[in-house]
Image (cartoon, rainbow, N blue to C red):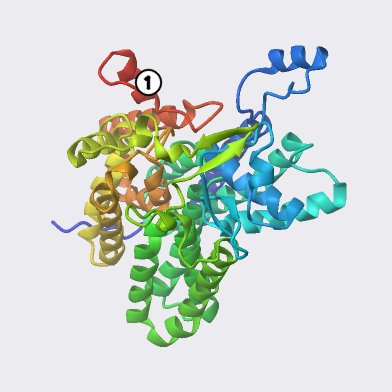
Amino acid sequence: MQASFAPPVETQAGHSLRWGIYWILIALAVGNMTGRILAVNSVDQNALEKYLKEKENPNWKKTRPFLSANDRSRWATVRSLVEHGTYSIDDVVSQPGWDTIDMVKHKDRDGVEHLYSSKPPLLATLMAAEYWVIHKLTGATLGTHPYEIGRLMLLTINVPAMIALFVLLGRAGERIGTTDWGRVYMMAGATLGTFLTTFAVTINNHLIAAACLAAAIVPAMRIWYDGDRRLRSFVAAGFFAAFTVAGELPALSFCVLLGLGLAWKAPRETLLGYVPGALVVAAAAVGTNYVAHNSLRPPYAHRSATNLDDNWYDYSFERDGKVRDSYWRDPKGVDKGEPSPAVYALHTLVGHHGIFSLTPMWLLSVAGVVMLARDPRWRPLAAMIMVLSLVCYLFYLFGVPPRDRNYGGTTSGLRWMFWFAPLWLIALLPAADRLTCCRKGQALAMMLLALSVMSASNPTWNPWTHPWLMNFMAYMGWISV
């Protein structure tokens, strides 16, 4: 029998009640993220720091609000742009507490070699605009006031992006969901059960990409399902789809597929709105990369195994009077990469970094997307979610060299797939709706949600840590970390 997801007769009271619950969940998530941001610290060495300061040790500062080499790499670029007027980070990473392994080395336009962040520079450039205002108004720097400025910028970047994501998901849930319980369940998963809130305490591209994906899919759904032909809807869809790519390069498949779908529905508006909106972001991403690195290719693409001049990861540099090798000449632990695709598939699906073992509520997304595909109305949306999920996962499994099958480095989840959270949350709605009338089904769904929230909450201080499941396996002696 064909599934049907036609919503029941709606009342204003029911709609208002659900949104009241949504805002309660959003308030809980915002309070949780804000509290963690205000406590963000790289390591609990406050007592040691106090002791060293009392002894007038010049190196008494041991703590910092920048949690890993990954985010320090971006913060170093932000500092260097505002304080030194350059994308090279030599003068920043040489300072105590500002070291990072996520950097490359290449010649500038004058032929002089410098260190640079290995991260695409667009996000850091946008952050530098806010930092410039703060620096000019207060005279403070990220070097002298890392906690005050760092936490303020986290609050003004990550928290608004997450609020926007939650509101957009609420709108999508109102459109696709058919029951109060299913819609509220989806919002509970969005606000508490994904690793996006876990990463709100650190600057990262995954959170921004997920928010941009939601900002693209909502106007696209209005265009597809409601016949919306306003040019601004097409511009918004193209702009935010391209910004998703700027955050996650494999999201190019999302941007292209969405554009093709809209072109099939409204070719003229797509050409006049979607394409220019996307091109603005593409120009900004490519332009900042060219200004930063004198190359149209991002640093990731300069890792040739045969041409040493085009391998920006193979270098040495000087710090504290010592010549040091790039970390990437001899990476450690998970950064060595997994040579076996089969083992990588096992651990990224149901193992220590498993999509389904760490966030089991995504099992409902698998069932839900199949249910969506049975309804002709939602079949295009289901097809997009299935195709994108499969293509991107297979890319990370087979389309990268073994060294890049590294689970995202030392991190609490498979962060390469975090940007799919909005699509997967939308996909689980039909399954959650179907369980509304079954107490046992609801109990199962709540258990899956509770386990997902546990995984997202486990890295209390720092998301750049191994998942709890990996630590448990190591404790049991099943794997080595």
Left or right? Give the position of 311 relative to 435: right
Say which residue appears at 18% left-offset and 39% top-offset.
Answer: 342
- Helix, strand or loop under label 1: helix
Say which residue appears at 58% left-offset and 56% top-offset.
Answer: 123
Q: Is residue 424 visible?
A: yes
Q: Is residue 280 above or below residue 272?
A: above
Q: Position of residue 210 (x, y in %)?
A: 47, 52
Left or right? Give the position of 443 relative to 313: left
Report the quarter where the C terminus lies.
top left
Q: Is residue 188 visible?
A: no
Say which residue appears at 74% left-offset and 53% top-offset.
Answer: 84
- The residue closer to the viewer here, 441 or 115, is 115
The three-letter amino acid code for the residue at tag 1 is Asn
- The residue closer to the viewer here, 309 or 226, is 309
Q: Position of residue 114 (x, y in %)?
A: 60, 52
Mark 1 Cα-neighbour bin, 10 Å: few <14, some 14–19, many ≥20: some
User: Which residue matches tag 1?
Assistant: 471
Which residue reaches farthest right? 138
Q: Position of residue 326 (x, y in %)?
A: 48, 40
Which residue reaches farthest left? 1
- The residue closer to the viewer here, 362 or 43, is 43
Report the quarter where the N terminus lies.
bottom left
Q: Is residue 72 above or below residue 233?
A: above
The quadrant where residue 32 appears: top right
